[in-house]
Image (cartoon, rainbow, N blue to C red):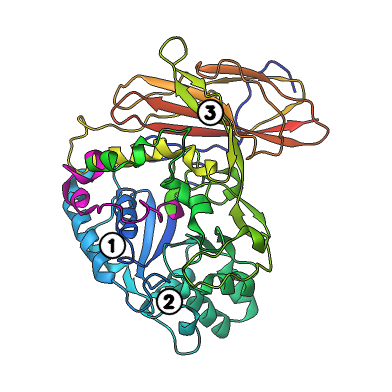
């Protein structure tokens, strides 16, 4: 392979969506079923409101009201229905900005009741519910896409579906159905999660085990950190950008009682933005980054929910650690400069993107009431040439050019290039030329075996709120 040649990018990540965000997945929406203990905490209502704003790029197949350790003897499907009615009022305006928003009638048809009692006591023969049967129905549909189960409360409705399938299918049929499931649960909010993980070793499962929520990856969506900008999770920010003056959905967005939007990370990585690759939790994205291993029991601490903390018997997708240096605004010269601190923990895998996805949320809330011309829309990330699959030999010079990026609203845009060492196999330092210049060059490092490097292009406009799209380049380095 010739050196000093323009190198393409691995995987042609592109999207048909009018926002121009590039999807690092096949060109189909992720289908998802939500399990929610809505009314146990205001954060379920908050997360549903955000979810509906992305209902045109995520295929919502079910919204099932469940119990949890915080709400053991009641379910509230009527509360989901109330939110869908509010969505129906703003849907016509949302369609001015992007197509594909489902009807209010369709979304209401997907609301189902889970078992209105708690945990594993409701898993077994004769314990079926409308919700567990709905999961089975959708799983058995002739749809090649994986079925994501986004668990915001207790998971016993999913556990019952698996119990029934195991009892009624032969081994081959059962394995085929389990292979289509993808579970992302907000810790363990009943005792069925550990049962499923230990009983079905092939079940794809993302979780921060236990219920000591302050140490969980997902909790960084509402965590305050001294070295990052926390404005976008403040009560003032929510009042201005979400709650007030944003139509029927905003008026229903509740104040925080415990932590804001604690359930939202369970679907953030399903949003097509050029960064998210839901099938690869180890690559990182808006929902955080997770690695596949068997966690030690001592690393998971039980708090006060009463959910038993039992040992994991196999590897799961769970907390991973990133090392990250935040960027600080710089008034003169380059607009951003690295901070003087490096932060290394599992929470950085999510909050490193937090301002981006909060601004995206705020922009879509604007869509509820504003005209296309008045609102902001995400820029389009592109790299020359259009061929994006490539490998390179050690020592070769790589040239990457983002000059074709543009903004649909005509806003000025900024670019930023970075490596994501934890997402690739090569862990050494890769020096990129000027990170905020439209084109960069870098030298492929010397390697003894095939390695991968992830290059992330961020394209951010100067509209209000400022919006970001990405393009993830996966470069294979050959010895």
> Furthest residue to the right?
448
Q: Can you say which quadrant of the picture contains the C terminus?
A: top right
Q: Which residue is mark 1?
A: 107
Which residue is depicted at the point 47% across and 13% down? 334
Q: Earlier in the sequence, mark 1 or mark 2?
A: 1
Among the 4 quarters of the image, the one containing residue 459: top left
Horizontal placement of 310 versus 406: left or right? right
Q: Nearer the viewer, mark 3 or mark 1?
A: 1
> Residue 326 location in percent, x, y?
51, 29
Count the marks: how many?
A: 3
Q: Are marks 3 and 1 in contact (CB under 8 Å)?
A: no
Q: Can you say which quadrant of the picture contains the N terminus?
A: top right
Which residue is depicted at the point 39% across and 23% down? 406
- Which residues are drawn in magenta? 240-266
CA distance separating discs 3 and 2: 44 Å
Q: Nearer the viewer, residue 250 or 138?
A: 250
Q: Which residue is mark 2?
A: 132
Residue 386 circle label:
3
Residue 246 inside the magenta-drawn segment: yes
Q: Earlier in the sequence, mark 3 or mark 1?
A: 1
CA distance separating discs 1 and 2: 18 Å
């Amino acid at each position: 392979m010739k050196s000093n040649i323009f190198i393409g990018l691995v995987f042609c990540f592109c999207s048909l969506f009018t926002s121009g965000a590039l999807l690092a997945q096949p060109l189909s929406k992720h289908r998802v079923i939500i399990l929610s203990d809505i009314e146990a905490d205001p954060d379920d209502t908050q997360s549903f409101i955000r979810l509906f704003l992305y209902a045109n790029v995520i295929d919502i197949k079910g919204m099932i009201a469940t119990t949890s350790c915080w709400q053991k003897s009641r379910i509230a499907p009527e509360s989901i229905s109330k939110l869908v009615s509010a969505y129906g009022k703003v849907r016509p305006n949302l369609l001015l900005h992007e197509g594909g928003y489902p009807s209010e009638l369709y979304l209401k048809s997907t609301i189902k009741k889970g078992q209105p009692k708690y945990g594993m006591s409701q898993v077994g023969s004769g314990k079926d519910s409308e919700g567990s049967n709905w999961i089975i129905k959708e799983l058995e549909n002739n749809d090649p896409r994986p079925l994501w189960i986004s668990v915001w409360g207790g998971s016993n409705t999913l556990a019952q579906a698996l119990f029934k399938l195991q009892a009624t299918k032969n081994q081959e049929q059962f394995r085929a159905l389990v292979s289509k499931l993808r579970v992302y649960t907000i810790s363990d909010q009943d005792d069925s999660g550990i049962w499923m993980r230990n009983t079905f070793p092939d079940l794809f499962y993302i979780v921060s085990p236990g219920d000591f929520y302050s140490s969980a990856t997902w909790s960084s969506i509402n965590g305050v950190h001294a070295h990052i900008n926390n404005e976008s999770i403040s009560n003032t920010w929510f009042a201005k950008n979400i709650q007030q003056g944003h139509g029927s959905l905003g008026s229903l967005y509740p104040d925080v009682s415990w932590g804001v939007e604690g359930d939202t990370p369970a679907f953030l990585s399903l949003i097509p933005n050029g960064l998210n690759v839901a099938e690869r939790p180890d690559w990182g994205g808006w929902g955080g980054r997770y690695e596949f291993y068997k966690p030690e029991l001592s690393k998971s601490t039980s708090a006060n929910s009463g959910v038993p903390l039992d040992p994991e018997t196999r590897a799961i997708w769970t907390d991973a650690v990133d090392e990250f240096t935040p960027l600080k605004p710089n008034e003169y010269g380059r607009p951003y400069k690295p901070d003087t601190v490096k932060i290394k923990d599992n929470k950085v895998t999510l909050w490193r993107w937090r301002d981006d996805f909060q601004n995206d949320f705020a922009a879509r809330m604007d869509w509820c009431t504003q005209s296309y011309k008045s609102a902001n829309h995400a820029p389009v990330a592109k790299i020359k040439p259009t061929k994006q699959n490539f490998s390179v030999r050690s020592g070769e010079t790589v040239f990457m050019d983002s000059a074709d990026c543009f903004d649909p609203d005509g806003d000025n845009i900024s670019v930023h290039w970075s490596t994501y060492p934890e997402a690739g196999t090569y862990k050494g330092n890769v020096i990129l030329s000027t990170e905020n210049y439209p084109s960069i060059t870098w030298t492929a490092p010397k390697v003894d075996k095939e390695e991968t490097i992830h290059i992330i292009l961020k394209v951010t406009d100067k509209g209000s709120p400022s919006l970001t799209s990405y393009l993830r380049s996966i470069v294979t380095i050959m010895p």
